[in-house]
Image (spheres, rainbow, N blue to C red):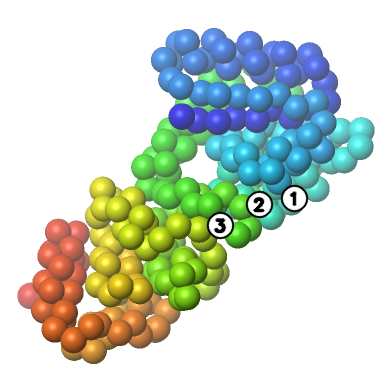
């Protein structure tokens, strides 16, 4: 399911986008939910209260606040959402990419350009959803790309998600639950009651520890080395990353 937000101070624009999307859903036979916002503050309130969107169509020039500032606020809660700016001028094109905009759509918006843009954005979202995980963290509901997950650990019943950029997310749930969620994706190994590692980010194996790409050494329990080694080598062979 793809979830979209339209935010524009012009009701006529919101109506047009709604009509386009309703037609798009029928013609493409895809499941998409959407919400319209006449005020950026209502959009931000929704996001701050835990609602997560896959795509946000955001007007840049609005009476109270500009879209660039709103996008900066959105990025504090969601780094992955695709922000598509709507505007009648190219004045803010450079600034739009500073906040990681997916696209900069000039008005007036034509049906054919909307459909083309949606095809691209939806395809990208579906791929990311297949390779990502949604977690309820202390900072809010967060979607993370599995390729960015380095390892997970439990400390005093607190689940910590370590990302490749050095960020650490404190999440609810247990390592047992997380392990079950990741089983279908493959490439993750629970080798210790307190640790789960992304095999893609294993840099070195020894009898005593797993060294991750950030050079952190995670202890291997006594007698588990052979199992860890075999699982790791099987993963590497399967992904054509081992040469003999």
Compare residues 130 and 62 and report the one nearer the observer. Answer: 130
User: Within 10 angstroms of label 1, few (less than 14), some, or many (20 or more) residues?
Assistant: some
User: How far apart in space, not on screen, are marks 3 and 1 (Cα)?
Assistant: 18 Å
Q: Residue at x 23, y 89 (%)?
A: 208
- Above or below, 37 relative to 173: above
Q: Earlier in the sequence, mark 2 or mark 3?
A: 2
Q: At which x and y percent is residue 146? A: 39, 56
Q: Residue at x 28, y 75 (%)?
A: 192
User: Within 10 angstroms of label 2, few (less than 14), some, or many (20 or more) residues?
Assistant: some
- Tell me the SS state at disc 2: helix
- Quick one: quadrant of the C terminus? bottom left
Q: Quadrant of residue 110?
A: top right
User: How far apart in space, not on screen, are marks 2 and 3 (Cα)?
Assistant: 11 Å
Check residue 73 in the rendering and tell me which mark sits there, or answer none.
1
- Tell me the SS state at disc 1: helix
Labels 1 & 2 near each other (Cβ < 8 A): yes
For mark 3, what is the residue?
A: 137
For mark 2, what is the residue?
A: 77
- Above or below, 100 relative to 138: above
Labels 2 & 3 near each other (Cβ < 8 A): no
Q: At which x and y percent is residue 37? A: 75, 27
In the current view of this chain or complex, which residue is farthest to the front? 157
Q: Earlier in the sequence, mark 3 or mark 1?
A: 1
Compare residues 67 and 30 and report the one nearer the observer. Answer: 30
Q: Is residue 153 left or right of residue 40?
A: left
Q: At which x and y percent is residue 74? A: 70, 47
């Amino acid at each position: 399911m793809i979830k979209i937000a339209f935010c524009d101070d012009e009701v006529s624009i919101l109506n047009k986008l709604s009509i386009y999307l309703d037609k798009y859903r029928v013609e493409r036979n895809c499941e998409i939910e959407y919400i319209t916002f006449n005020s950026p503050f209502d959009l931000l309130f929704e996001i701050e209260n835990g609602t997560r969107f896959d795509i946000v169509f955001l007007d840049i020039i609005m009476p109270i606040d500009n879209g660039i500032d709103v996008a900066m606020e959105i990025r504090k809660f969601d780094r992955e959402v695709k922000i598509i700016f709507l505007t009648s001028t190219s004045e803010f094109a450079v600034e739009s990419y500073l906040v990681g905009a997916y696209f900069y759509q000039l008005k007036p918006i034509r049906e054919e350009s909307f459909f083309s843009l949606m095809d691209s954005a939806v395809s990208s979202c579906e791929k990311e959803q297949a390779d990502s995980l949604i977690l309820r963290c202390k900072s809010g509901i967060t979607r993370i790309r599995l390729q960015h997950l380095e390892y997970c650990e439990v400390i005093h019943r607190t689940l910590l998600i370590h990302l490749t950029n050095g960020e650490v997310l404190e999440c609810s749930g247990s390592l047992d639950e997380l392990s079950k969620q990741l089983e279908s994706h493959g490439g993750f190994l629970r080798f210790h009651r307190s640790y789960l590692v992304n095999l893609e980010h294993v840099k070195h194996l020894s009898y005593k520890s797993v060294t991750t790409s950030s050079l952190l050494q995670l202890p291997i329990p006594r007698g588990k080395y052979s199992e860890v080694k075999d699982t790791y080598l099987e993963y590497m062979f399967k992904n054509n990353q081992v040469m003999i």
